[in-house]
Amino acid sequence: MEHFQQVEPFDYVIFGATGDLTMRKLLPALYNRLRMGQIPDDARIIGASRTELDREAYVARARDALKRFLPSDILSPELVERFLALLNYVPLDSSRQSEQWDSLTSLFTKAQPDRVRVFYFATAPQLYGSICENLHRYGLITANSRVVLEKPIGTDMATATAINDGVGQYFPEKQIYRIDHYLGKETVQNVLALRFANPLMNAAWSGEYIESVQITAVETVGVENRAAYYDTSGALRDMIQNHLLQVLCLVAMEAPDSLEADAVRNAKLAVLKALRPITDATAATETVRAQYTAGMVDGKNVPGYLEELGKPSATETYAAIRAWVDTPRWKKVPFYIRTAKRSGKKVSEIVVTFRPSATTMFGTTPARNRLVLRIQPNEGLDLRLNVKNPALDVFNLQPANLDTSIRMEGGLPFPDSYERLLLDAVRGDPVLFIRRDEVEAAWHWAEPILEAWKHDKTPMQTYSAGSYGPEQATQLLASHGDTWHEASE
Ligand SMILES: NC(=O)C1=CN([C@@H]2O[C@H](COP(=O)(O)OP(=O)(O)OC[C@H]3O[C@@H](n4cnc5c(N)ncnc54)[C@H](OP(=O)(O)O)[C@@H]3O)[C@@H](O)[C@H]2O)C=CC1
Ligand SMILES: O=C1O[C@H](COP(=O)(O)O)[C@@H](O)[C@H](O)[C@H]1O
């Protein structure tokens, strides 16, 4: 099975090796891929960060992280030891020139020059340029090297350009892998299968049949220990400019010629470029922003955003936007996007509502067909159709739901989105990573909204933690005769 094919031997250098992302996501994901037989025993994972640790101390941290972030039933002592044997650690301030780099370069002196080398930047984006400069200075970049960039790629166009220029000076675009973990989700990739492998869907996938699209990613967590980062970001930068626009692209794009990286990225780019600008003049009617106040989530009282932060802030923890894709396919189809912290539940989904049937033969108007693609949790899809109500002699209708779960073969749990992406970088397959022009097109659309918000064109609303969001978000849809789909429906 291709899914379980072993990749070629590689060296993965993780900058930011002691950080939250590495411990919570990257090491557990790599362990899981070793467990699946995809990582050869002569692969190497080299952690680098400033904290002075020897290899043993780093391995102890990694061992704890696996225990903490993976279910115990998948942690076999033998596999854990095999995984830990791949680890090395180098204390290194990667943004400065120093002899500390010699420890890293010495690990590569005997390495075959064509062995795959992945440099993963799990650290602050302002360091990316100087890390690349040092990688170049110390002769670490080879023809078979790739660099993986974590989000955020900037907080606006100017900062994104600075990051991309800084990295682009040392790595050609084809060696740069900008990660968006939503593209690593199986159920997000499934949008392509559903649309293009099913003539039934493909034929109906346009404004002729589709009335509206909703893309939701809401979560119960607040900003917790990431408050310092989040307050400089907010819902639009943190989730919409990247993850949710990428999902929108997959829903709205024209069929790519193939699944080759540039074919898919060109198709997504065309969507991003077709997004209707939202400006100071339209922000008030097309966008909603809000902050959570104290409330109850999962049966527990939780404080409001400003209380958590301990200072005033104009950062939104909720955003809802009515977006328009100005292409012939999507004429008159609103795309509603929303994201929230401290929502009543954690749900990511795409809801496609079809136009009503024009038939009058049943006396009543049939309910609209509706397709719900559950990204998470309960990964699957649900298609609402109309059938005859069998309990009645007269022709009356009732809704019938074709609901199916998407499951892993053999009942395996869904892989974490990082698993696939981490190894795609080794394989040299950038299809699920973001090209520079996509990042820029996304900022081109998002930045004027942020500007309008800065000018207070859209008032900051509030919502209670644990609720569905502010009333104004309901109004955003009501003005088009729509309602948000809430996952329990
Ligand atoms: N945590 C998460 O869930 C997510 C994080 N990200 C992104 O991933 C990146 C890392 O996030 P996160 O792990 O949370 O952050 P942390 O603050 O937890 O970790 C930052 C890491 O960078 C290291 N570091 C800082 N400065 C240097 C330096 N000059 N040279 C070498 N290493 C350095 C730190 O170690 P030391 O102090 O020892 O140097 C630490 O290992 C950020 O860009 C973040 O936006 C993206 C999505 C989710
Ligand atoms: O990138 C991010 O995503 C998470 C939500 O990811 P999910 O896979 O759990 O839906 C979000 O919590 C975080 O703020 C954001 O930076």
Image (cartoon, helix red, strand yellow):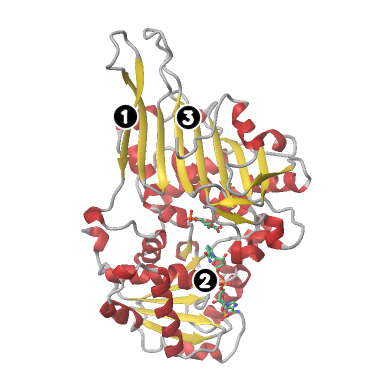
Residue 298 position within the rendered picture, expressed as x and y whole percent measured from the top left: 52, 52
Whole-number angstrom distance, CA of label 2 to CA of label 3 = 42 Å
**Left of 201 or right of it: where is 17?**
right
Q: In which quarter of the image is residue 67?
A: bottom left
Q: How far apart are marks 1 and 2 (CA)?
A: 44 Å
Dots 1 and 3: beta carbons under 8 Å?
no
Q: Label 2's element? A: helix
Q: Residue at x 51, y 43 (%)?
A: 216
Residue under numbered circle 1: 200
State left or right for residue 131 relative to residue 47: right
Q: Is residue 188 left or right of residue 155?
A: left
Q: Name the residue that disc number 2 marks.
A: 20
* Front-lying residue, 6 or 270: 6
- Amino acid at dot 1: Leu
> Going 45% across and 88% down the picture, which residue do you hit?
57
* Label 1: which secondary element: helix
Label pair 2/3, CB-CB below 8 angstroms: no
- Disc 3 crowd rating (10 Å Cα; few below 14, some 14-19, many 20+) is some
Q: Position of residue 329 (x, y in %)?
A: 48, 29
Evaluate whether residue 279 shows in this view: yes
Write down the residue under mark 3: 329
- Which image quadrant: the C terminus? top left
